Image (tube, rainbow, N blue to C red):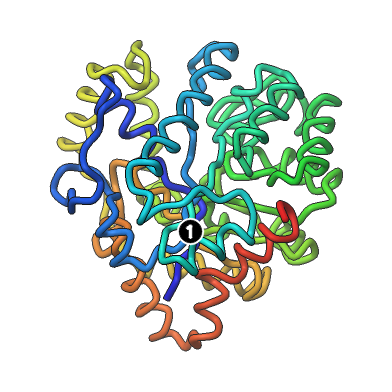
Amino acid sequence: MDVFDGHNDLPWRLRIRYPSGSFADLAQDLGGTGLHTDLPRLERGGVGAQFWSVYVPNDRPEPQAAIQVVEQVELVRRIVARYPDRLAIATNAAEVEQARATGRIASLLGAEGGHCLDNSLVVLGSLYKLGIRYLTLTHSRNTAWADSATDTPAVGGLSDFGREVVRELNRLGMLADLSHVADSTMHAVLDVSTAPAFFSHSSARALCGHPRNVPDDVLQRVRETNGVVMVTFVPFFLTEECRSWGDELYRVEDAIALPWDSPEFLDHRQRWIDANPCPPTTAADVADHIDHVREVAGVDAVGLGGDFDGTEVVPGDLPDVSAYPALFAELSSRGWTDADLRKLAWDNAMRVLRVTCG
């Protein structure tokens, strides 16, 4: 079954692992290296379309973030150019289908965090011209114009400029991604936007109280806008036990007074994780969230946003991008039909892409 996944952080993982600019041969199975993603495992997982995150940490000054997001776009284009028989850049639904018809994985671009705009609609337009087709409005910290789910509220959701950003996203044909934003921001965007609601990698608040997850009143609005929530596999967002563990990890990270991509920061964090393992999760936990989104927002509102290579911890039976069939097997055991699974895996994301981006 073809999979359209909403979020994969391989580009940033490659940037920090291979700062020289060269990177491992993704045509090889890199299982055991710590990477969740390579071409053989994407193919085993049935991935036919992938939104690659052109993420930049939000500890960067905004002018620097605006430069680095362009560098990340170029990194994705280099990856695609290196494997032209396996990957193809796509910016709309027709290009996704064309890639699929030629046996290649459609590679779309999503910018994670509005700090990369440097408060400029001109930069937003330039990112669109570079092929980016979603903007996650915040990451873990507020921007000057939008509140993050994991920061102290500052503008009540969106400022006047934030509403301009949403209107410009609509005009350009670019998805306003609501993963990472505060509840007030979710509602403010949905009050302004004329496009379907879109979450690239979030789960259900009713099952796990992490502020990154989607509350039921917003899920109702996802249904009303014919939008999609691409449910993530990150354990922090799946169970209360893992959420508590993640909160402690965030405190550890905050105490490390180093850039998020420095080798020292990454080593310190990994040593803490090794000494304090995350409570276990499985595909059944992910399926619980998918079932809840379906129950509240409808079967047309569910998608998949694994966030592989954007997390150090994953469910035990969903270890990498080859594992989507294990999730489908779990859902099949719960009564999901093949038609339901096709909506989850492909059709719903494609509908929202087609309506918003063409």
Residue at 48% in and 59% down: 49
Q: Quadrant of residue 334?
A: bottom left
The picture places residue 123, in percent across and down from the top left corner, at 69, 22
Closest to the observer: 345 or 269? 345
Q: Label 1 is placed on what type of residue?
A: Ala
Front residue of 11 and 85: 85
Name the residue at 78% across, 29% down.
Answer: 162
Residue 62 lies, in percent from the top left, at 59, 14
* Count of numbered badges drawn on the protein: 1
Report whether 179 appears left or right of 7: right
User: Please, is residue 245 above or below residue 298 in the view?
Assistant: above
Along the horizontal axis of the image, is 316 left or right of 288? Answer: left
Relative to 336, is 125 on the left or the right? right
Q: Residue at x 47, y 54 (%)?
A: 50
State whether residue 320 is above or below residue 60: below
Which residue, given by chain and number where applicable, does mark 1 sit on?
A: 49
The N terminus lies in quadrant: bottom left
Residue 217: % across, % down = 73, 58
Q: Secondary structure at mark 1?
A: strand
Could you say which is closer to the camera, residue 40 or residue 307? 40
In the rendered image, which quarter contains the C terminus? bottom right
